[in-house]
Amino acid sequence: MLDHFASRSTPAHRLDPAAKAVALLAVVLATVLVTRDSFLPLVPVAAGLAAYHALSRTPIRYTFRRLAVVSPLAVALVVLFPFLEPGEVLVRWPAAGGEVVVTREGLVRAGHLLSKFVLCTWAALLVLATTRFQDLLQGLARLRVPRVFVTQLAILYRYLWVLMDEGMHMRMARAARDGGLGPWRLRWHSRAGVVGVLFLRSWDRAERIWRAMAARGFDGTLHAPRQHRLRPVDWVFAGGVLLASAALLVGDRLVYG
Amino acid sequence: MADPLVQFDGVRYRYPTGMQALDGVTLAVQPGERVALAGPNGAGKSTLVLAMAGFLRAEGTIRVAGHRLTPASARDVRRHLGLVFQDADDQLFMPRLADDVAFGPATMGLEPQEVEARVREALAAVGLEGYDDRVPYHLSVGEKRRAALATVLAMRPQILVLDEPSADLDPRGRRRLIHLLGGLEATLLVITHDLDLVVETCERTVVLDAGRVVADGPTADVLADPALVAAHGLEVPHRLAGQGGG
């Protein structure tokens, strides 16, 4: 689960979820907006995240595993840059009717985008690893994120596991009868059937959840979250990260224009 | 006699598939009564509950706590009904248990302190003190069932309607539920085919079959009649076996 380590108690865990959400937004914005000409501005971001990581005592394996899961997406996005970006040619292969070249600028650009992706994902993973999801939702609600959006996230988080359970049970029921054998065409056919039935079941469940909500008086208006007071340490943390991110951006503009 | 809290008068409902689920149900529940609605699968029990909460538009008259049910009054009617659905996963839709229990009172527009007090009281009533931060998905089936009951108790409804409350429970969970229901001071309508649970919690039993009321009387009389229960796909509960005979 994403928030598997979120119930621990370290200074990083005890920070207010709203403060962490603000800090995350600041870090992501700064990381995305700094120059693409140098890796230098990314160093303080990485150092800050490493410090938070150490403070939260999140196992390194947790972060690596999850990064590994989402990275193929980023790699797929940048894989063509070394071949397409014009610049100093490093390698040249003859190919049908012309040649394929790899440029230094292209490699740097790809490496840069990949680094930014890893840093942003790392930051998000750290927030999830140190904040229980329901607390994060409360934090978002307090930051005036539209309630409809927060409620949708809450319901998605609540039922994702139920849906996964249902899918797993159906898969087991299928495997118990076909033993994973049989012609591939039939296997794919039955897989498609599982997806279809899962969709219909979700539809039915959505209807039943709505009834349960309506039975308790739900009329489309969602009610305000519990009030919560920020501690000085939360202000210092959110303010510090905001200031550091702003300083990074200003410095970046001054140096790289 | 006081006005009935719930009254069905000639209630009929036919599903779009053509199945006549309710075929002229007439029934009244007095304040403080504990009534079991028993019957085989497909008898129309759950349909009756959906009709009573205005989720299905049935023909005939339904009154709840003095309100006549119409599409316009459905929301008011639901305020008096505490519906606990069969699948607790449908009822517990928030990621944190205390937020789920707070959902009803908050929707009623109560002050935050009052909501908090109701959450405490409801969780204590079902023996789940200290479960505020628990994720409903990780609760056991028995805990989920009790949590679902708490979400409704927090609204202090005039009548509690429980749909198959003992389904999927192990013997210990079932015992606990029976004990819990016995201690509640509310008008109760329990939809079930767990007749041993009925014997221990309800003094009156209504048997529904093919959308009609086929028996209505003291539990000990209705359920001890082997011919009657067998004719409607039920069994004489263990507790009453040997006492009856018609």
Image (tube, coloured by chain):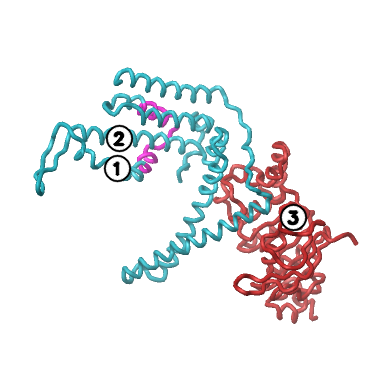
Mark 2 on the same chain as mark 1: yes
B191 left or right of A140 in image: right
Magenta highlight range: A45-66
> Residue at 55% across / 22% down in the picture?
A232
Image hue for chain A:
cyan
Q: Whole-percent x and y of residue B145?
A: 64, 56
Q: CA distance from mark 2 to mark 1?
A: 9 Å
Q: Tell me which corner region of the image, top left, top right, bottom left or bottom right, holds residue B62.
A: bottom right
> SS for tag 3?
loop
User: Dot 2: within a 10 Å radius of its alpha carbon, few (fewer than 14), some, or many (20 or more) residues?
Assistant: some
- Find residue B21 and name its label: none
Q: Contact (CB < 8 A) between labels 2 and 1?
A: yes
> SS for tag 1?
helix
Look at discs 3 and 1 and give the one toward the viewer: 3
Q: Tell me which corner region of the image, top left, top right, bottom left or bottom right, holds residue B133.
A: top right
Q: CA distance from mark 2 to mark 3?
A: 58 Å
Query: Which residue lies under the disc numbered 1?
Result: A77
Up/down of A10 relative to B174, above or below:
above
Task: In the picture, one chain is red; tell me its letter.
Answer: B
Q: Whole-percent x and y of residue B20?
A: 67, 74
Report the label total: 3
